[in-house]
Image: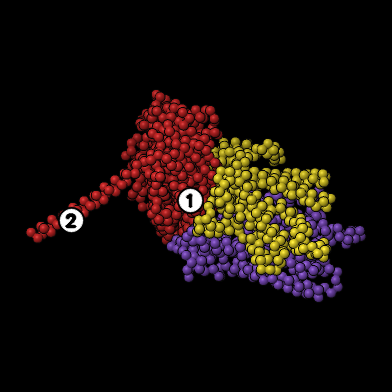
Amino acid sequence: MSENNTMPKSKLLSIQPEKKDIQVREWKRITRVMFGRIVVTGGALVILALILVAVFAPQISPYDPYETNLFAILAPPSKAHLLGTDEVGRDLLTRIIYGSRISLLVGIVAVSIGGLIGMGLGLIAGYAGGWINTIIMRVIDALLALPPLLLMLAIAVMLGGGLLNVLIALGIGIMPTYCRLMCGQVLSIKESDYITAARAIGANGLRIILQHLLPNSFPPLLVLITINLGTAIMMEASLSFLGIGIPPPTATWGAMVSSGYRFLLTNPLISFAPGVAILLVVLAFNMVGDGLRDALDPRLRGII
Amino acid sequence: MKEINRSIKAVQIITASCLLFLIGVIGHVEKAQAQSPRYGGILRWNVSEPYSLGYPATMTGQTDGQTSSVCLETLFRFGLKGEIVPLLATGYKADAIAKTITISLRKGVKFHDGSDFNAEVCKWNLDEFKKGKRPELKKVTSIDIIDDYTVRLNLSTFDNTIINSIANASDAGRMISKKAFEANGKEWCEQNPVGTGPFQFVERKKDVSIKWKRFDGYWDGKPYLDGIYNVRIQDPTVSMMAFKSGDVDILIPRSARDAKALENEGKYTTVIRPMGQVPALAGYANDPNSPFAKLKVRQALAYAIDTNRLAKAFGYGYWKVHNQWAVPGTWGYNHDIKGYPYNPEKAKQLLAEAGYPNGFKTTLHFYNFGQEYVDEMTAIQGFLKAVGIDGTLNGLQRPGFAEMASLGKGWEGVLRLQGYSSPDPLVKYAGIAGRQEFVGIYLSSEFVSLFNRATMAPDFETKQRLVHQLMKQSVDDCMAAHLYVKMAPIIKTKKLHDDLFGEVLYSYLSPKAWLEE
Amino acid sequence: MLSFISRRIIHTIAVLFIVSFFSFLLLHIMPGDPAAAMLGIEAKKEEVEAMRKELGLDRPFLIQYGHWFANVLRGDLGKSLMYREPVANLFYARLPVTLYLSLLAFVISGILGISAGIFCAIKRGGFFDQIISISANIGIAIPMFWLGIIGIYLFGLKTGWLPIYGWTSPFDDFILSSKQALMPVLLLAVPGISILARQSRSSMLEVVRQDYIRTARSKGLSERIVLLRHALKNALIPIVTLMGLHIRIMVGGSVLVETVFSIPGMGFLLVGSAINKDFLVVQGGVLLIGSIVCVTNLLVDISYGWLDPRLRYE
């Protein structure tokens, strides 16, 4: 466990005089530890590819993802259609490329919603303490008592489906971990000596907490966000698979697996290919998250 | 002489081959006849989850009626040609002037609980159905018992479609035991059907199965089958696999594609059900601001869709394109109607004339039964977009569809009408003409008055003539863009005989059905 | 210990209370009139009114909640619109199926996951360690429904080894039941195995570095005894805390697995009800599953406090 011996220096950062020098060394160490593992580098490349594909989808797609072609229904893979066509003659490869847009969008927006609400609540709970803390944390406990997929399914259905409602549901499902993380961070800073000292000389506690919060919680947050991007993509795919997600004809990987399932015997590729895409992307986010954790703060192993 | 000889020879050859052919045919016939019905066996097939099984007034949709039809019998049923055949009744007499329908009932029929079927029970059943505020018997003001086995329906206005409703296993006319109802109440009856049919209810495991066993006291002789086992397999691929592996004997394939694949295997009996779903797209015309309030826009919608191509792509030869409410091959079909065959240029032109040269945005609402429906609507969306009608798909589930279809909420844009065709188009139409269903579809006063005249027609010829006029009126008004009749095949094991399943309307299973070992 | 247990119980009750409030709230975040949305195709205006009354939608919010909660305590979760049956009855028939599958998957993932993790820790850096670590990562990232479909394709459609759908009670036909349950249970266990393998590996590695292990080794105890007696016992403690989380994963996974294999359990019911807008079933399901997880967490907490006395005074 060599990586465990190099303790994070984030706390030291603010005190040490030769900041720049240390920052450069720290940065070098982080990149070395992180990209030292092949899987992490591979994951990072997959994520990079995902972003590029999503951004340049119209440029690289051979066809229009929504253009149906009733003359070429369920065509097998060929030169014209590398992965074949689906049940209404749309090019499968194009649909998978466009599906990356939804996945990326869902990941980013859901994590933003969940992260902002969760961090806000965690901040309030940690700072206010007392009964406010108790109430917020019990609410979080209650949310954590429900399987995330079930919680998201219930919320999405009650709100009436559709992209926006799915995003809200995913955000709420992701929120609790951020709340807990933030609350814990605030509490640990609150008890530290310099806050007590600052308070003693009459400084604003909240300001100091906020000042110290960011550098301290940045590493775990980054790790959590990375892993949650994968989780959100997976959850969206699961909801779409169950038929409760984003309505057709939008190209989403989960819905593609679900609708291609009917052709398992004759055209297994229709459901297999989007599944591979989900697996690769989620795996990539998890790997990069792991790598980040090892590089930034190995103590987080087992907590996140 | 030579020529005569030659012709004699030819005659000989022809005679000989005819004889050979005849022997072959007779042999074949004999072989077929050699198989005589045998007792025993459980017939299994896949059903959707029914809601109510045994209380007609709360039974809705096809599933409830079809699933329970082995147990609950109707007064009449439909024959192979769509004609009305007596079942629990023995006949009826309709009197258009006196506004009555007199039905004579079968004698010696017993319910599964041992109680008798008679005029009193029949009246009670129809009254109970009326209490459920169902539209089918709305025009029946009262029911008189003439004698033990005769009832008379008194009508507010004469309606020649009522008898059809009574014969339809999904509508009125199913007879349940009054004794069982009085002993156990409505909720019990919903889950425990007690009828007169060849099979009696054993148990139901929700989401899993329904079991029925032979009713030895059946009025038409002891049924051959020991029982019926309905399983519920939701997934179409899985249900197809279950059929192929012999886990079920009858398959109602969800898609025409699956049906074709099985038919091509040649190992099974394939029958085409006499009626199919008749989807049509209706623009909301009740709001003057809606583009579909304009005839030209409604016509453009109809011209824009290549129904032939759709039927070819998704129907695998089973779907028949049509252009009116009535189904080709039935008496109501008006052959003179040209309709709106695919013509995207014409559609664009009509849109421009109506004031939408650049098209418009709208929503395409449809009842999402499954992926096949999404596929179809996605393709339709493509056709509409090509002429400038840019629609967003909105797949609805039961409650959402109900709001638009029967709760009168209306819809923004286009709604896909759903439902099965009926041998009598007036039955299919009643909800729309009576402003009970799909309120918001374009409805002209000419149409309504023609409809009412047709339902009151005292004889068939008058009715047919009026129905043909009605069809023309509806196409002239372009109430909806008709797509096709989705004739649905049913695939059965070759071991099943004399069952009529799928051959007559509404999944009627003949009590004479039997299974080979 | 008693005060620890009572504190945990009070905590659980508070959480349960909030879970119930969430479930109640679900019906009210619905846009539009829940009563109208809940009724079927044949609904009429009077029926909608009657439904509003039945649901108590005409009364103030908190009174509605109190009324609903009182009903819940009596076991009355309302009536399903689709099945026309009390929601509680529906659950009564389906919960055992889900519990049976989840419990089997729970045991399997516990045994396989922990032993794989410990094996990896002992043979750290070796070939199997790498293979298992990679598989565990894939196991976490793989879409469960997709894996199920691949399973159906390979073991059901292509080879015909296993049935691809359905459920039979083990008391009715044990062999058929086991055949039908094999794929779903293994599938349900996949995320659990993966998470436990990773967790127990790092937990074991953590323990091996501790002083007491070094002491044990220096005493000349055999490596086997050191690992099994001293290291394993301590490494297991943090893994036990994961069990609460684990239950959540199992029940959540059953939603997908039951849908893929058409198994009539809670997950299958809830997905079907969600799609058909049978809201009371969804509401009741959220409440029931939330409560089950809460109670299991309580049990895990108590047993953990019993194992590790330090925790009781936190």
Q: Could you say where residue B375 lies in the image, as x and y percent from the top left?
A: 49, 56
Q: Position of residue A222 (x, y in %)?
A: 73, 64
Front one among A127 and A293: A293
**Which residue lies at the image location 51% right of the left edge and 29% below the top edge?**
B180
The chain holding disc 1 is B
Furthest-bottom residue in this view = A21
Say which mark, if any, is on residue B13: 2
Per the image, label 1 sits on a secondary structure element best described as helix
Q: Label 2 amino acid?
A: Ile
Which colour denotes chain A? purple
Does residue C255 appear anywhere in the picture? Answer: yes
Picture disc at residue A39: none
Chain of the residue under the numbered disc 2 shown in the image = B
Q: Tell me the distance, in whole angstroms, between the alpha carbons under discs 1 and 2.
A: 50 Å
State the residue in front, C241 or B515: B515
Which residue is the site of mark 1?
B242
Work out whether residue C232 or residue B221 is closer to the camera in this orientation and state it: C232
Name the colour assigned to chain C in the rendering: yellow
Q: Quadrant of the C terminus of chain B?
A: top left
Q: Is residue B355 above or below residue C57?
A: below
Does residue B400 appear in this view?
no
Colour that chain B carries in the picture: red
Query: Residue C308 placed where, x, y %?
Result: 80, 52
Residue displayed at 64% across by 45% down: C285
- How many numbered dots are placed on residues in this image? 2
Q: Residue at x 71, y 61 (%)?
A: C118
Q: Residue furthest left?
A: B1
Neighbour class for label 1 at 10 Å: few (<14), some, many (≥20)? many
